[in-house]
Amino acid sequence: MSFSTDVKEELTKHIPGPRHCALAELMAIMHFAGYFGKTEDDGLIIGFKSDNPCVLRKGFTLWKKTFNIESAMVLRGAEADMVMDKFGNLSDPVDPVFLKSSCCRRAFLRGVFLSVGSVSDPDKSYHMEFLCENEAQAMQLKDIIRDFDVEAKIITRKKYFVVYIKEGSSIVELLNVMEAHVSLMSFENSRILKEVRNTVNRRVNCETANIKKTADASSRQMEDIYLLRDTYGLKNLPEKLREVAEVRLEYPEATLQELGEMLSVPVGKSGVNHRLRKLSELADKVRG
Ligand SMILES: [Zn+2]
């Protein structure tokens, strides 16, 4: 199952207690993913444009909870008028009167995410988005997200106004606002794992590169020294060079620093480097 589906499953189970919150969430679902249809004899039917089972489940649960309206019911007369009147034009933003309290704005965000939201798997990338059908709704959503100190951006994609968030920390914040706490934990876990993995990889790559560099240099030095041994004779080298040549042959994997410490009169890295370069120049002379 995708992470997005996990979040929606979690949000679906989250049934608001107070009626004001239930109403705010229902408003969001109806405005972003609902429609009102008419039967032939002018009855009002409630439907959803989304085929996501979470939207249908949550939507009808909230209709039952707020207005005691069952899913298959056709509304007529005063009841139909009341509903039409309360919800207004569904392609308009939700009436701000329903979004006064912060608890209701959280509920609104839950409803919008269920209806048109998605979030990518945190193992892959950090991206959360909401596909809005018109600009006014996208603006309202962006404003309400900003109320919780999260910056969202809007781009157009085909006929949609896409409200999106890219930062991992902002996605965490919004999951927190929507009270999707289980999803938040799993998002954070994979974010931490990814960071640890990246750091370890960087370190391993760096160490591997260093080891390879040391090994390459060492094998060049050994070649030179073997050549000098076989042509010139190590015992004929100046004392300081002979000693470095001998420890190099004996400890092919040692760093310059370590070689320097093994000498009878220890020298630093640059001292060892200097002597090895001398040896290599001698070897070049022999070759040339
Ligand atoms: Zn509320």
Image: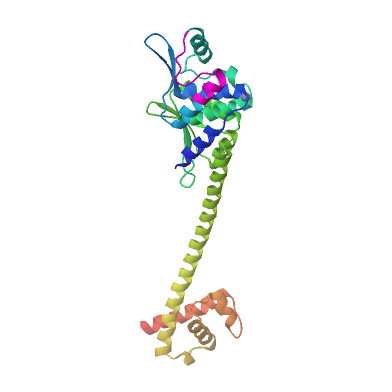
Q: Nearer the viewer, residue 182 or 172?
A: 182
In the image, residue 67 sits, relative to residue 204, either above or below, namely above
Q: Is 148 on the left-hand or right-hand side of 40? A: right
Quadrant in which the N terminus appears? top left
In the image, residue 7 sits, relative to residue 86, either above or below, namely below
Write the residue at 41% across / 81% down.
223
Q: Nearer the viewer, residue 71 or 225?
A: 71
Scheme of image coloration: rainbow
Write the residue at 54% across / 33% down.
13
Instruction: Say if residue 3 shows up in the picture.
Output: yes
Q: Quadrant of ligand 1?
A: top right
**Rendering coords of residue 174 (x, y %):** 56, 35
**Rendering coords of residue 38 (x, y %):** 40, 13
Write the residue at 46% across / 22% down.
135
**Rendering coords of residue 246 (x, y %):** 50, 86
In the image, residue 93 sits, relative to residue 55, either above or below, namely above
Q: Is 47 on the left-hand or right-hand side of 12? A: left
Write the residue at 38% across / 26% down.
159
As for residue 202 lying within the magenta part, the answer is no
Q: Nearer the viewer, residue 56 or 235?
A: 56
As for residue 66 lying within the magenta part, the answer is yes
The part of the chain drawn in magenta is: 60-76
Instruction: Say if residue 130 shows up in the picture.
Output: no
Q: Nearer the viewer, residue 259 or 176?
A: 176
Quadrant in which the C terminus appears? bottom left
Kindly give the residue lying farthest to the top in the view shown.
77
